[in-house]
């Protein structure tokens, strides 16, 4: 939908939106540019381009600060988490939306209720639970916590998607002789791809950026995730003052998300559309 | 209820049990234990704890830091929400007046939501920096030296933090609200335009009433997000959050894990976490009551 307004008004509308977008682009560009500077250049000409684009900061962060290890940890652990969340949440959301059984709505509310619980209340018991079952300081223990705390939001979103297509589709599949499980695999999953992709992206972003739980449950430096690595690097800045290296780290942490986002932006937006309206 | 829904009943147990188990064992059970801890004097060195009834809760009520942290929570929720939704609605109106680059603009508005909070804080830390920050540079070059203030000093830091929060989240809520607008049939707008309604009029007479349910979802989601917000304020002042911006999640974290003096007051921290959970639930209920009305069919 587009309104017909006066030309000056239209120009003004564009100006406001472009200005806001420009601030977003420039801030990211500034992080990128600074990551190629030396510390001296940063302090002398903080808003100028560097004299030469050298990759020293990246080399340093990759080798000296072990970011390669953290990056590897994140790039393995986060996708596994995201997939496991889907494996659990998609079937659960499906039966909670498109099946009829006792306590269905209660179980749905029970899951959605979790969105209102601040994870921090469960922090200390989680710590002891993981230590009791020998999973403290392991990435699998951390993953279990991530998965458990992501289920509420994922099921809430997927519930919206599963509710948004007509009942007749299940019935058509039934008439074709599919068992309920077959129709789930053959009819429901393909139809819900937008929803599944949206939930995937949301979980990916939030787990990739999460660092409070990762900071507390992982003590070994070799098992650190990238988010904690960046946070620790920021913490060490007060001693080293080596800001440009930190910026190189920030760029590396942002890169996968930006690539992901550029490829998927439209799907994220469209996914949000269906989910939010139904939710 | 349709037949296929009854047939799907067979799937209920195998489809639900795995996620229920993980959810209960690794989230609900720890959350309930947290509630349980709040009635104990529990230092966290060993597993010894003494039952002290509601003493932790009573102590919190006379704890100055608790109250100031609660005020910070409420400021972020109220002012952050106010500006986020005001801006999101303004963007919504002007977005309807443009014809080109809609997809790109929408994506760029959303972009800050994918940036890690640590990166956002580092970036804005440099913008707000008193000595060489961008903001003060710009103000100087525009001849507005009298507007220069130390943006990260105690008296201004809340404003700066809320600005950064608004900058980060406005795109997300804009996209949510826009999703509601995209469900309104064009014909509704067309007849309004034929009758000579301006974009502002149609906004208040058509858009807002028709996206009210989406708006409600967005507000509830903001309340939950803002009251639980940890990462952004935590890294806003660098490695250790300064007291002026401790909200309840940060205070709980500091009580339990974040102190140098090794006094880990887990029972007390749990009591404050219980207060926080109650506050979240109260606000969610209030907002749902206030905003509930007949939804409009179209």
Image (spheres, rainbow, N blue to C red):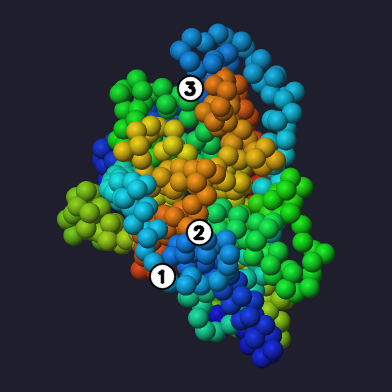
The residue at 17%/55% (across/down) is: A177
Depth check: give the residue in front, A54 or B262. A54
Task: Name the residue carrying label 1.
Answer: A53
Q: Residues within 10 Å of mark 1 (few under 14, many from 20)?
A: few
Callout 2: SS: helix
**Residue B33 shows which numbered tag?**
3
Q: Earlier in the sequence, mark 2 or mark 1?
A: 2
Q: Position of residue B146 (x, y in %)?
A: 82, 64
Q: Position of residue A50 (x, y in %)?
A: 48, 70
The answer to whether residue B160 shows anywhere in this view is: yes
Badge 3: chain ID: B
Q: Position of residue A265 (x, y in %)?
A: 41, 67
The residue at 55%/54% (across/down) is: B122
Callout 3: SS: helix
Task: Name the residue carrying label 2.
Answer: A39
Give the quarter of the figure containing the C terminus of chain B: bottom right
């Amino acid at each position: 939908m587009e309104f017909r307004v006066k030309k000056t008004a239209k120009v003004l509308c564009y100006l406001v939106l472009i200005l806001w977008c420009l601030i977003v682009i420039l801030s990211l560009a500034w992080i990128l540019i600074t990551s190629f500077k030396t510390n001296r250049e940063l302090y002398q000409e903080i808003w100028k381009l560097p004299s030469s684009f050298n990759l020293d900061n990246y080399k340093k962060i990759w080798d000296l600060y072990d970011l390669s290890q953290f990056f590897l940890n994140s790039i393995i652990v986060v996708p596994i988490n995201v997939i496991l969340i889907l494996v659990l949440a998609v079937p659960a959301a499906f039966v909670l939306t498109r099946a009829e059984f006792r306590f269905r709505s209660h179980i749905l509310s029970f899951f959605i209720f979790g969105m209102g619980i601040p994870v921090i209340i469960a922090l200390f018991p989680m710590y002891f639970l993981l230590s009791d079952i020998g999973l403290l300081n392991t990435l699998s223990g951390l993953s279990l916590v991530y998965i458990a705390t992501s289920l509420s939001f994922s099921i809430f979103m997927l519930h919206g998607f599963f509710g948004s297509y007509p009942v007749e589709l299940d019935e058509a599949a039934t008439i074709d002789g599919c068992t309920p499980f077959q129709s789930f695999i053959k009819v429901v999953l393909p139809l819900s791809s937008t929803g599944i992709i949206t939930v995937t992206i949301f979980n990916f972003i939030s787990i990739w950026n999460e660092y409070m739980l990762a900071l507390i449950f992982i003590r070994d430096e070799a098992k650190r995730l990238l988010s904690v690595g960046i946070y620790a690097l920021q913490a060490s800045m007060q001693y080293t003052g080596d800001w440009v290296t930190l910026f190189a780290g920030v760029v590396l942490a942002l890169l996968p998300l930006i690539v992901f986002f550029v490829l998927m932006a439209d799907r994220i937006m469209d996914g949000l559309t269906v989910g939010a309206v139904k939710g | 209820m349709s037949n296929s829904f009854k047939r799907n009943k067979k799937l209920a147990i195998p489809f639900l049990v795995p996620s229920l188990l993980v959810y209960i064992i690794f989230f609900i059970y720890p959350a309930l234990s947290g509630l349980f801890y709040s009635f104990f004097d529990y230092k966290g060195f060993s597993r010894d704890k003494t039952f002290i009834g509601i003493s932790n809760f009573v102590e919190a009520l006379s704890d100055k830091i608790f109250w100031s942290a609660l005020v910070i929570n409420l400021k972020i929720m109220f002012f952050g929400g106010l500006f986020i939704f005001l801006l999101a609605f303004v963007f919504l109106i002007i977005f309807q007046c443009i014809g080109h680059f809609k997809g790109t603009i929408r994506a760029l508005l959303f972009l800050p939501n994918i940036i890690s909070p640590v990166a956002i804080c580092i970036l804005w830390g440099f913008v707000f920096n008193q000595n060489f920050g961008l903001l003060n540079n710009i103000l100087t070059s525009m001849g507005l030296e009298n507007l220069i203030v130390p943006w990260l000093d105690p008296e201004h830091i809340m404003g700066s933090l809320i600005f950064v929060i608004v900058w980060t989240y406005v795109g997300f809520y804009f996209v949510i609200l826009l999703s509601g607008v995209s469900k309104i049939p064009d014909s509704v707008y067309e007849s309004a335009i034929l009758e000579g309604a301006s974009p502002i009029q149609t906004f208040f007479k058509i858009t807002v009433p028709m996206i009210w349910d989406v708006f409600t979802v967005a507000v509830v989601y903001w309340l939950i997000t803002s009251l639980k917000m940890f990462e952004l304020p935590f890294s806003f002042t660098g490695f250790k959050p300064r007291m002026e911006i401790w909200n309840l999640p940060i205070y709980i974290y500091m009580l339990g894990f974040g102190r140098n003096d090794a006094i880990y007051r887990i029972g007390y921290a749990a009591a404050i976490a219980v207060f926080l959970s109650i506050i979240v639930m109260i606000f969610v209920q209030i907002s749902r009551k206030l905003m509930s009305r007949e939804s409009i069919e179209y």
